[in-house]
Amino acid sequence: MTSAMDTATARSRFDGAKALFFSYSLLSLIIFTWWALSTAGWVSRVFLPSPQATWASLVEGLTDGELLAFSGATVSRMLLGWALASLFGVALGALIGLSARARAYLQPTLEFIRPLPASALLPLAISIFGLSPAMVLSVVAFGAMWPVLLATVHGFSSVPAQLHEVARCLQLSRSAYAFKIGLPNALPDVFSGMRLSLTVSLIVSVVGEMIASQPGLGQAILLAARSFRASELFAGIALLGLIGFVSSALLAVFERRFLKWQKV
């Protein structure tokens, strides 16, 4: 038994190392292709700067320029919008998921609103809030709420029938059932929705900054593009990718630790 477990653990580690190797190899290949295209002059450096120039602009922007302040504004807007989306998404999703009648009544409406891109609602938000930080935050929270809400509805509505019988035998109240049975069953789905929501909040934050001229990486990227500062443009894009990667990785680590009890 122990030997089989050791073999499975070793195989899992080998698969993880192999996936990591291929991931870094693909990233290295992309950077090398980028360097070759910019160095050989096949693409004008006005549109495609070299990796060295992009790195120099990134370092300069973070140390001496406004890139660090812009990054902080975007991250704070992303996290606040994501927190609001998670709070309202879990609360509304739990209320809907606990009631079969509510799901039957609201499912068509949810499916109608869900595909609407949050950026399409920016004109409506501008007419209500004006070109203000509150406008961008409201659109970010609205756009990022749907993955959490729908995942929470699925998690609460997919409780096994055996657990319903246990709750009935123990005569649990609706609130006790929600916290002791429904929420633990829904947590994996909730975290999946929150990971997707985090990505949506970053995207909508950048789009909102571009359209509403709010301080942030979106505004910095737009100004760099209009001024044909390609290295600063690519530095901003690279920084956005790094922010998305780090935030998603941190949330995944927290999820593994928080849901460790499920593997017991």
Image (cartoon, helix red, strand yellow):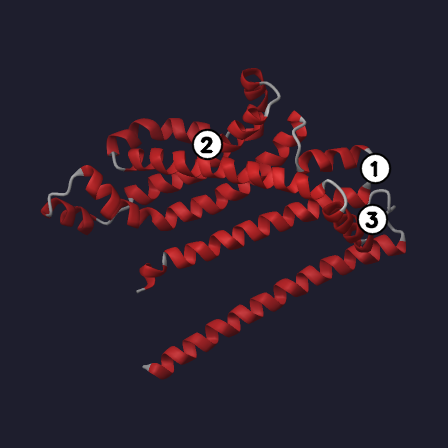
- N-term-proximal mark, 1 vs 3: 3
- Residue 191 lies, with reference to residue 131, above or below; the image says below
Residue 182 is situated, as x and y percent measured from the top left of the image, at: 26, 45
* Quadrant where the N terminus is found in the figure: bottom left
Residue named by callout 3:
49
- N-term-proximal mark, 1 vs 2: 2
Residue 50 is situated, as x and y percent measured from the top left of the image, at: 82, 52
Which residue is at a point 57% across and 16% down the rendered structure image? 127
Question: Toward the viewer: 129 or 35?
Answer: 129
Q: Secondary structure at mark 2?
A: loop
Question: Toward the viewer: 25 or 255?
Answer: 255
- N-term-proximal mark, 2 vs 3: 3
- The three-letter code of the residue at mark 2 reads Arg
- The three-letter code of the residue at mark 1 reads Phe
Q: Residues within 10 Å of mark 2 (few under 14, many from 20)?
A: some
Which residue is at a point 29% across and 42% down the rendered structure image? 156
- Residue 238 lies, with reference to residue 257, above or below; the image says above
Which residue is at a point 43% across and 48% down the rendered structure image? 192
| Label ID, residue 228 | 1
Q: Residue furthest right?
A: 41
- The three-letter code of the residue at mark 3 reads Pro
Q: CA distance from mark 1 to mark 2?
A: 37 Å
Residue 124 is situated, as x and y percent measured from the top left of the image, at: 55, 19
Residue named by callout 2:
114
Question: Toward the viewer: 245 or 24?
Answer: 245
- Residue 125 lies, with reference to residue 186, above or below; the image says above
| Label ID, residue 160 | none
Dividing the picture into quadrants, the one containing residue 17 is bottom right
Which residue is at a point 16% across and 39% down the rendered structure image? 173
Q: Which-is-in-front pick, marks 2 and 3? A: 3
